[in-house]
Amino acid sequence: MSPRPGEVWLADLGLAAKTRPVVIVSRYDPDAPRALTIYVPLTRLERKLGELPAEAFDQIRQAIAFAVDMA
């Protein structure tokens, strides 16, 4: 299994034994050191729980930009 960016897959997100569609956003690496995939679930939001501090969110954005080959 080698998902590529932009593909839509069904994934078990651990929600009541149901699968949900997700969009693959991690960069393609045919020789990846780990079998990890970054995806975005295609679902609705229920309610806001809070907010991260700006500095923490910036660090997350930088890490994601690298992981999805947008850095």
Image: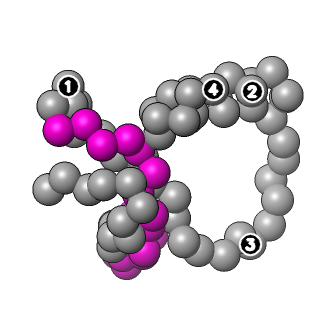
Report how far apart the C-alphas of labels 1 and 4 lie in the structure: 20 Å
Which secondary structure, mark 3?
A: loop
Q: Which residue is mark 3?
A: 46
Instruction: Classify 10 Å Cα crowding around label 2: few (below 14), some (14-19), many (20 and above).
Output: few
Q: Which residues are magenta?
A: 14-30
Q: Position of residue 34 (x, y in %)?
A: 22, 31
Residue 56 drawn at (x, y percent): 74, 24
Q: Which residue is mark 2?
A: 58
Please name the residue that numbered disc 4 is placed on. 62
Label 1 or label 4, whichever comes before in sequence order:
1
Q: Residue at x 42, y 61 (%)?
A: 6
Position of residue 2 relative to residue 68, above or below, is below
Picture quadrant of residue 9: bottom left
Q: On the rendered structure, is 63 left or right of 53?
A: left
Whichever of callouts 3 and 2 sits on the residue coming sooner in the sequence is 3
Disc 2 from disc 4: Cα separation: 6 Å
Q: Look at the numbered disc 1 and give the secondary structure of its residue.
A: loop
Compared to residue 34, the image places residue 2 above or below, namely below
- Taking the magenta stretch, the answer to whether it contains residue 27 is yes
Give the amino acid type for the residue marked by disc 1 in the picture: Pro
What's under tag 2, amino acid-wise? Asp
- The amino acid type of the residue labelled 3 equals Glu
